[in-house]
Amino acid sequence: MLPRIGRHAGDGHTGDWRARLIDISPPISESTPVWPGDTAFTRAVTSDLGGSDAVTINRITTTPHIGAHADAPAHTRIDGATIGSVPLKPYLGEALVVDMTGVDGAACIRPVEETVERLGGHLPQRLILRTYPKYPREWDNDFPGVSPELTHWFADRGGVLIGIDGASFDPMDSKTMDGHHAASDRSVAILEGLCLDDVDEGYYELIALPLKFLDLDASPADAVDPLREFRREFAIPEGVLYFDGNSLGARPIAAQECAARVIGDEWGNGLVRSWNEAGWFDLPVRLGDKLAPLLGAGEGEVVVTDSTSINLFKALASALSIAAAQDPSRKVIVSERDNFPTDLYIAEGIISLLDQGYELRLIDQPGDLTEAVGPDTAVVMLSHVNYRTGNLYAMTEVTAAVQERGALMIWDLAHSAGAVTVDLSGADADFAVGCTYKYLNGGPGSPAFIWVNRRHQNTGIQPLSGWWGHARPFAMESAYEPGAGIRRFLSGTQPITSLSLVECGLDIMLKADMADIRSKSLALADLFISLVEERCAAYGLELITPREHERRGSHVSFVHPEGYSIMKALIARGVIGDYREPGVLRFGITPLYLGYADVWNAVDVLRGILENKSWDRPEFRERDAVT
Ligand SMILES: Cc1ncc(COP(=O)(O)O)c(C=O)c1O
Ligand SMILES: Nc1ccccc1C(=O)C[C@H](N)C(=O)O
């Protein structure tokens, strides 16, 4: 049984993660109304810290049918299962909230059908029915119940749970309890007394796990509902909790069909004609335009092409050429010691290739940046989200500070695109690069992207002057003439099969609201941090990710001296994160396919591994080539 989520709300270090969850459990206290004649909630203190006792302990007396609660089949059937023996799965997962406030009498089929039709035709396995415009604080005799027809109709369509805000599935005067019987006959789990005041119609993730009272007829349940509708777009193997979308995103289900189309039809049947007919030649630009809104960029500013490393080479070389034209005395490239190594290596490569006295100046922490940028600085090149710590730079402020000091700003968005809200135009940055295989779910090694501010597109030198960046590629002229606009940043022929798959990930991402992704990411990460700190406190994990939302990307990293073995043990148990030197356990938070229950379950596994020291085995110490 998972513990109550709500209990973690006020304990100081959890931040405001609950702000993005909707708690649909009314508070339980002595003033909580219960069915007339049933046992109200009372408590007595049996041991008191305020007195001379070592701990405080209460004793409670209550009906289990209090507040938001789950009815067990044993409530209305002599041979029915008790709440401690019901399966938990129905209480956890995607739910549709339907507004029944305008319906006379019991909740019925029609409004469900209408809502499903209006919202796009998908009926999940859980239904939550709202019958009150405002949840009653006093006992209300006049609740409508759930019609047996609705329960049968829903069970016929695979339904496993119905929840309602009213106090019961049957009206108050029912002697036959038909609503309850229909549910137990059809194995549909029952939730009653949900407070839905803040919940609009739509799809949510329901978490409403009953406390495991072995022999009881019901149990109080806590229910929280963050938005969740995208998980079914991804193929994630059974038994895997995937926390590594920051290295390689999960596979969109659509990718398989897309691959079959590109290979079978476009390549197989279209052959070379597909460069025109299937739009292969324009694909880098078309996908760039599709990606642009996720970066706060406009049309004609982004191409999807090459790798991040190669795009960084192009961006840095171009930026240096622009800076040199303005002020050739500026010879410093500022970056961060903790930047992803390829970024620093590429800068070193350009410096030695140009051989013009350029040097790399590395800061040791984000706070040192402004001091490091001065009249000698040509370009500043930073990862927006740090690959190891998850530190997030304030893009607008940093860009402004850099440009004020006369330098150009290049952002590496590898850990930002699809993970955090990005506004390149708003920040008026100079160049940006990033990959599509992480949060954009483009596939292993899928082509990366480059964004170039329009003011620079036709000015700098793009040194990888291949024919795809030529003004007239098929004129086959012997001299290079750079094309205009973002096409200049193309070099040569692209891996079309891999490039095509990028579109599947983008299409999913574009259906979601980036603000929702960001807030769910923060909520999941807050939950993850608070659970690890609370439940694994004894085992020496140290958080290296900033707690402040405005300084954090979309992964969470903990350091532990045995980090490598612990991560390998986690992966062996199906909790897939990754390891980075030194000692960093890194967990990617991908709101499109991770839910709150996944976080609970992953922390459970982590705690078990730490508690039993099951990481301490030779096979978990053996280093793989890729960590
Ligand atoms: C910040 C950052 N830049 C660049 C890269 C990699 O670049 P490439 O795709 O060229 O290997 C990564 C991860 O691989 C990264 O995290
Ligand atoms: N491209 C890869 C290939 C193999 C293994 C990992 C990667 C990564 O992307 C690592 C990632 N950039 C990181 O932040 O560690």
Image: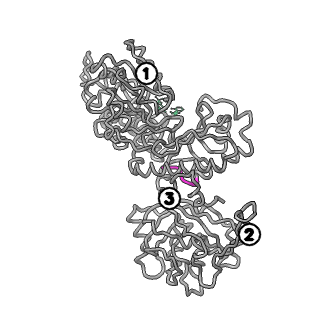
Q: Residues within 10 Å of mark 3 (few under 14, many from 20)?
A: many
Residue 21: mark: 3
Q: Residues within 10 Å of mark 1 (few under 14, many from 20)?
A: many
Side of 308 relative to 622 (left or right): left
Mark toward the viewer: 2 or 1: 2
Residue positioned 61% across, 28% down in the render: 625
Instruction: Tell me the chief SS of the magenta region.
Output: loop
Mark 2 residue element = strand
Mark 3 residue element = loop
**Which segment is the magenta one?**
591-597
Mark toward the viewer: 3 or 2: 2
Q: Is residue 596 magenta?
A: yes
Side of 476 relative to 491 (left or right): left
Q: Going from the N terminus, do you reach mark 3 or mark 1 first? A: 3
Mark 1 residue element = helix
Q: Is residue 130 above or below residue 429?
A: below
Side of 556 relative to 455 (left or right): right
Q: Position of residue 547 (x, y in %)?
A: 52, 45
Residue positioned 62% across, 69% down in the render: 220
Pointer 2 and pointer 1: residues touching (CB < 8 Å)? no
Q: Which residue is mark 2?
A: 46
Which amino acid, mark 2? Thr
Q: Position of residue 194 (x, y in %)?
A: 53, 70
Front residue of this view, candidates 2 and 265: 2
**Residue 4, picture quadrant:** bottom right
**Residue 474, picture quadrant:** top left
Q: Residues within 10 Å of mark 2 (few under 14, many from 20)?
A: few
Residue 389, visible in the rendered structure = yes
Marks 3/2: CA–CA distance: 34 Å
Asked whether mark 2 and ligand 2 are closer than 8 Å, the reply comes as: no
Residue 347: mark: 1
Front residue of this view, candidates 272 and 547: 547
